[in-house]
Image (spheres, grey):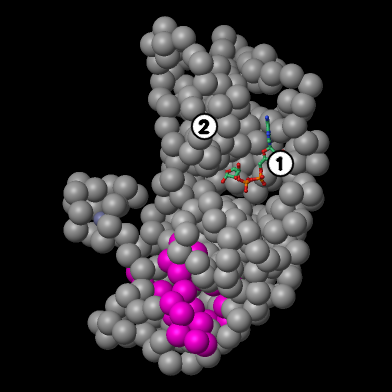
Amino acid sequence: MQQVKAVVAKAKGEPVSIETINVPDPGPGEAVVKIQACGVCHTDLHYREGGISDDFPFLLGHEASGLVESVGEGVTDVAPGDFVILNWRAVCGECRACKRGEPKYCFATHNATQKMTLEDGTELSPALGIGAFAEKTLVAAGQCTKVDPTARPAAAGLLGCGVMAGLGAAINTGGATRGRSVAVIGCGGVGVAAVAGAALAGASPVIAVDIDSRKLDAAKKAGATHTVDSSQGDPVEQIKEICAQTYPGAEGADIVVEAVGRPETWKQAFYARDLAGTLVLVGVPTPDLKLPDIPLIDVFGRGGALKSSWYGDCLPSRDFPMLIDLYQQERLDLDAFVSEEITLDDVEQAFTKMHDGNVLRSVVVF
Ligand code: APR
Ligand code: ZN
Ligand code: ZN
């Protein structure tokens, strides 16, 4: 067991605090990781606000990279000294989804078995089974994916959550590729990553839509060929026109990624698709929201696919090393997502900044 500094949300809605926590030595199948960087994600704030569960205190942080410090019995995939990106979906290999070759739908993902605790012995709930706003954390070895150790930690860690969700929504879920058009509605961190994914896959045009013009600038830098400011009204007609310029007769985009998570924007995404196009919902809706009012005949008549993208439908062992290689070759600009590097003490302030519109990601570096 060892003691380290960490960011803990002790009670619903209250500011986070820096605490000393106890990190057990890794047991069978576990690893202790010395965290090098961890991005601040909306989900951390949702935990702090009590929107995810009531299991306070939470050890926040889940978008991280670091060096494996020690591993427990039976761990062979990673070893001390490995540079890894942490994932929150270590799959079981045994359930029906895993057995039919679709581990992205595994319903028996796992985390470390032992508990990290506060100094007084209170058990901590690590955010998404990770808890990486900490100098060190305990995870299941399956949550660690080894990548090129020369990659910048702050950029690499972002693949652990938001950036992977966006890239994967466009590429893995939507099937973006050369010869297809992509529109992305909502260009926060996730949406801009979807734009980057579409561009990386060779799709064109890549249309970025947002109500905030600063977000459209970020999307342009990530590879959007066109931008639509939807603060003045419905963007559907403009998306159709842009797609028809490249593909005469097209009635919308082949793939529309909805990265807001609201019925109004889902409805825009539905109608901005070409016939037989794919809608990908990656923005996470709050539980109270319902499908928008759309005539069933339109669902029938337009065909295509209505999908959701969970963690970008990623397979960490396949996607993390590949995307890090593309980053190292300067074909994927992960640095553009790192708006600022901060310390553990600044996490509460970073939550405030999330809403001011200038920050894609604040990243704690150690
Ligand atoms: N039309 C277009 N864009 C919109 C609209 C709208 N009606 N409403 C909001 N947006 C834009 C915002 O301007 C912002 O750029 O959507 C973007 C949301 O980005 P972030 O708040 O940074 O969220 P992000 O981290 O990208 O996550 C995407 O998934 O998990 C949820 O709460 C999260 O709703 C967010 C979404
Ligand atoms: Zn499984
Ligand atoms: Zn996250």
Report if residue 284 is visible in the image: yes
Please name whichever residue, 186 or 46, is drawn nearer the observer in this view of the structure.
46
Return the residue at label 2: 289
* Left-right relation of 118 to 344: left
- What numbered label is drawn on residue 106? none
State the separation of the CA atoms marked 1 and 2. Answer: 27 Å
Answer above or below: position of 167 versus 89: above
Answer above or below: position of 119 versus 125: below
Residue at disc 1, CB closer than 8 Å to ligand 1: no
Answer above or below: position of 215 versus 227: below
Residue at (50% x, 67% y) in the render: 56
Foreground mark, 1 or 2?
2
**Residue 139 among those drawn in magenta:** yes
The percent coordinates of residue 363 (x first, y second) are 67, 66
Kindly identify the amino acid type of the residue bearing the numbered disc 1: Ala
* Left-right relation of 142 to 58: left
Residue at (56% x, 27% y) in the render: 263
Q: In which quarter of the image is residue 90?
A: bottom left
The percent coordinates of residue 252 (x first, y second) are 57, 17
**Residue 235 among those drawn in magenta:** no
For the C terminus, which image quadrant? bottom right
The percent coordinates of residue 358 (x first, y second) are 79, 50
Report if residue 82 is visible in the image: no
Answer above or below: position of 255 versus 126: above
Residue at (76% x, 56% y) in the render: 353
Highlighted magenta segment, given as a residue range = 116-142
Q: Quadrant of residue 247?
A: top right
SS at mark 2?
A: loop
Return the residue at label 1: 219
For the N terminus, which image quadrant? bottom left
SS at mark 1?
A: helix
